[in-house]
Image (cartoon, grey):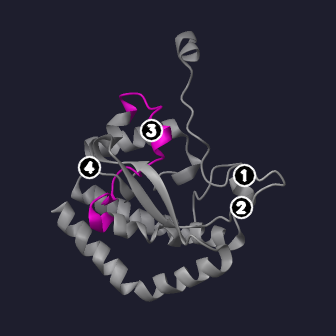
Amino acid sequence: MRRVVDIGIALFVLIVFSPLLLVLVVLVRMKLGNPILFKHRRTGLHGKDFILYKFRSMTDATDQNGNRLPDAARLTRFGKFLRATSLDELPGFFNILIGDMTLIGPRPQDSNFMKRCTPEQFRRHDITPSMTGWAQVNGRNTISWEERFALDLWYIVNRSVLLDFKILALTIYVILQRQGISAQGHATMPEFTPPSPRLEAAE
């Protein structure tokens, strides 16, 4: 049933918002250049990697030595607008359509980051990753990685149709309020760095 709902919603969004998608394609090309889509390897169901599609929101600006500038320096005003309104996420509905993602669940993360997870944290991949989830409506990018993982695991244990409707409603509210777009001092979220074994032993 979830898969049927996912396909229905993805098709609805892609068809109804196709004029907006075309406008965004043109604007991204004009303001940020090619490629129009940002493609990134994320960890999906049962640890299998897939390519996530988003509209790009950063330039390819480099320093005098040819090194790419930090995210904050490459994030333009237009890019900030795309992220604040979550319009950059619209291509992700193609991921839902082909089965890489679902509408609600744990948000897929960088595959390199997920290699650093503990076995318990990696349980977030027991279900299909999503466009939005319990962590996204409880702090989004302002919460720590540990809090995010804990919220993802809580959702896996407690997920239900009613909870999904609640998350969907809260997601709309969070987007409209433009809450939790970035962590303090970061363009989005800091890199995931798990505690060192020495620190954990000392504690």
Seen at 26% across and 67% down, the residue is: 6
Q: Residues within 10 Å of mark 4 (few under 14, many from 20)?
A: some
Please report whichever mark, 4 or 3, sits nearer to the chain's N-terminal start: 3
Is 99 situated left or right of 133 in this image? left
Q: Assign the N terminus to one quadrant of the image.
A: bottom left
- Based on the picture, tell me whether residue 170 belongs to the magenta stretch: no
Q: Residue furthest left?
A: 1
The reply to whether callout 1 and callout 2 are in contact (CB within 8 Å) is yes
Question: Label 3 to label 1, Cα distance in Å?
Answer: 22 Å
Determine whether the residue tagged by mark 4 lies in a helix, strand or loop. Answer: loop
Label 2 crowd bin: few (<14), some (14–19), many (20+), radius 10 Å = some
Q: Residue type at mark 2?
A: Arg
Q: Position of residue 176 (x, y in %)?
A: 52, 72
* Position of residue 175 in the picture relative to residue 33 (left or right): left
Q: Which residue bears the numbered disc 2?
A: 74
Q: Residue at horizontal 25%, vertical 59%?
A: 162
- Up/down of 14 relative to 2, above or below: below
Q: Quadrant of residue 161?
A: bottom left
Residue to which mark 3 is pinned: 114
Quadrant housing residue 143: top right
Amino acid type at mark 3: Met
Q: To which residue does mark 4 refer?
A: 159
Per the image, label 2 sits on a secondary structure element best described as: helix
Residue with the mark numbered 1: 70
* Residue density around tag 3, few if under 14, some if 14–19, many if 20 or more, within 10 Å: some
174 or 152: nearer the viewer: 152
Identify the magenta region.
96-121
Mark-to-mark CA distance, 1 and 2: 7 Å
How many angstroms separate mark 1 from mark 4 (CA)?
A: 37 Å
Measuring from the top left, give residue 86's x and y in whole percent: 52, 68
